[in-house]
Image (cartoon, rainbow, N blue to C red):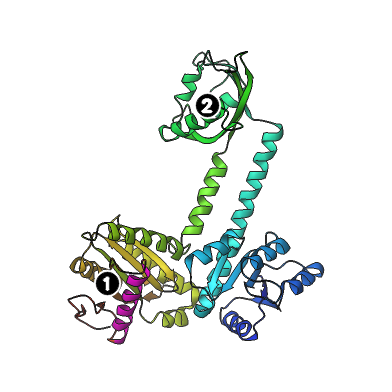
């Protein structure tokens, strides 16, 4: 395996030692360089090859907060950055990502597994971002010089007087076809119904001189029936003596590939790549939405479950991280197979998962939680070498309350109930103390 070159920018020797310790037991072949400031990092980069990844503390002697991320990004360019922070706050973490980082880690929860997965995720995301930037650069070059769909629209007559071959071919036609649409309306009918209002608004704003041009991204129906994403950009080229717009000219660019890549990047940012479940950020947003529903409609209960794999460290120790990943993936598949489409399952980190059950009271939540426990207990996970692994899970249960502090209050109660389940023997469901029925649901045979 190729050695992973890493740079740690951290001014606290204690925290640096924890990173080194985590990397030592991560199982990856790595070379780590340690610097205590952005200035020292800049000097190193002037004389040495770029690393594979940067591990960056936000508070340094020569920079603090988001300015540290921005300064580091200016130095390292496309090299992926993993921010090390003591803030377990979703909004703060999103700010770090928007400033240029690819991922972040909470120092207080730093483990070898989480560090390794974060590094791999950051490298994967950086590569996808590079591909996206390259695609956008190609589009800009095309707009400047070639192969664009060109059109000229006489507004009073509602006719296109000029359409080039690229415009026509973009939607599956050729210039010499009898079936080629002529009136503007025939082409506008190809706009996706959900995009028509946006196009009409952009056009009206420009014709009323409220916007310098017409510009929007819309879908148009291809002759073969599928939808093509296009960027439409145009402006009024001439007006009547009375000032009314007369002629509109513009270009049209097929941006389907860029849109698809942007959607893949968005999915990557919101999805745990190992299990396919929503990651912590995505799950917390979805949970926050459910909390809002509880505030508006307290008569519609929302149940929250916290669960994790019992003795997962033993699985990693016995079968390695690759075997642990197979078990995590199988675990996620087992629990999602027991849920409704409206239920939300997410991976919060490591072997810790959570589930939100809309319109579900305590009794219904207990029923679902027990189904999940039984499904996991019945699992038989086959590893590549033929070894079969059996696991169990412990679950904590609560209901969202109107006076919760956002969704965090419910998650904290469910987490406390989960640890009660651990203390009482694992492989069981335990409700939080605030619920009327506090007795845990226990399996017939304790594992």
Q: Quadrant of residue 46?
A: bottom right
Tell me the quarter of the image containing the N terminus: bottom right
Q: Is residue 418 magenta?
A: yes
Q: Is residue 146 left or right of residue 447?
A: right
* Earlier sequence position, callout 2 versus callout 1: 2
Residue farthest front in this picture: 242
Residue at (61, 49) in percent of width and height: 132
Characterize the magenta stretch by its predominant secondary structure.
helix
Whether residue 226 is visible here, answered yes or no, is: no
Foreground residue, 416 or 278? 416
Residue farthest right in this picture: 47
- Residue 209 marker: none
Q: Which residues are the magenta region?
A: 407-423
Q: Is residue 45 left or right of residue 317?
A: right
> x and y percent of residue 49 in the render?
76, 67
Label 2 environment density (alpha carbons within 10 Å; few <14, some 14–19, many ≥20): few
> x and y percent of residue 340 in the render?
27, 57
Disc 2 vs disc 1: which is toward the camera? 1
Residue under numbered circle 1? 398
Foreground residue, 336 or 216? 216
Label 1 element class: strand
Label 1 environment density (alpha carbons within 10 Å; few <14, some 14–19, many ≥20): many
Q: Is residue 36 left or right of residue 48?
A: left
> x and y percent of residue 127 in the render?
62, 57
Label 2 element class: loop
Compute the Cα span from label 2 to label 1: 55 Å
Foreground residue, 385 or 400? 400
Residue at (59, 26) in percent of width and height: 167
Residue at (30, 59) in percent of width and height: 343
Residue under numbered circle 2? 172
């Amino acid at each position: 395996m190729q050695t992973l070159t890493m740079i740690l920018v951290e001014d606290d020797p204690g925290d640096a030692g924890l990173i080194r310790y985590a990397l030592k037991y991560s199982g990856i072949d790595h070379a780590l360089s340690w610097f205590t400031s952005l200035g020292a990092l800049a000097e190193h980069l002037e004389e040495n090859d770029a690393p594979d990844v940067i591990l960056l503390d936000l508070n340094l002697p020569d920079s603090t907060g988001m300015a540290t991320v921005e300064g580091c990004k200016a130095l390292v360019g496309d090299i992926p950055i993993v921010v090390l922070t003591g803030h377990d706050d979703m909004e703060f973490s999103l700010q770090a990502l928007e400033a240029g980082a690819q991922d972040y880690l909470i120092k207080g929860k730093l483990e070898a597994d989480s560090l390794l997965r974060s590094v791999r995720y950051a490298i994967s995301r950086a590569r996808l971002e590079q591909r996206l930037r390259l695609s956008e650069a190609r589009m800009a070059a095309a707009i400047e010089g070639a192969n664009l769909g060109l059109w000229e629209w006489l507004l009073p007559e509602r006719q296109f007087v000029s359409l080039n071959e690229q415009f026509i071919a973009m939607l599956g036609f050729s210039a010499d076809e009898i079936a080629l649409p002529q009136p503007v309306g025939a082409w506008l009918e190809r706009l996706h119904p959900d995009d028509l209002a946006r196009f009409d608004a952009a056009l009206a704003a420009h014709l009323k001189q409220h916007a310098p041009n017409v510009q929007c991204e819309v879908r148009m129906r291809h002759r073969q029936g599928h939808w093509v994403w296009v960027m439409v950009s145009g402006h009024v080229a001439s007006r009547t003596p009375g000032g009314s717009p007369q002629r509109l000219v513009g270009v049209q660019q097929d941006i389907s590939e860029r849109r698809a890549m942007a959607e893949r990047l968005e999915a990557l940012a919101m999805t745990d790549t190992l299990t396919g479940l929503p990651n912590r950020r995505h799950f917390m947003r979805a949970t926050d939405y459910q909390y809002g529903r509880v505030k508006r409609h307290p008569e519609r209960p929302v149940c929250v479950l916290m669960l994790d794999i019992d003795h997962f460290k033993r699985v990693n120790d016995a079968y390695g991280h690759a075997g642990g990943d197979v078990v995590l993936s199988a675990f996620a598949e087992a629990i999602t197979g027991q849920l409704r489409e409206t239920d939300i399952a997410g991976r919060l980190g490591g072997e810790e998962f959570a589930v939100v059950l809309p319109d579900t009271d305590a009794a219904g939540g207990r029923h679902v939680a027990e189904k999940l426990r039984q499904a996991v207990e019945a699992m038989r996970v086959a590893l590549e070498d033929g070894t079969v692994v059996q696991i169990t899970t412990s679950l904590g249960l609560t209901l969202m309350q109107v006076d919760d502090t956002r969704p965090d209050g419910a998650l904290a109660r469910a987490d406390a109930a989960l640890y009660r389940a651990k203390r009482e023997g694992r492989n069981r469901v335990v409700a939080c103390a605030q619920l009327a029925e506090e007795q845990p649901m226990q399996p017939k045979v304790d594992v």
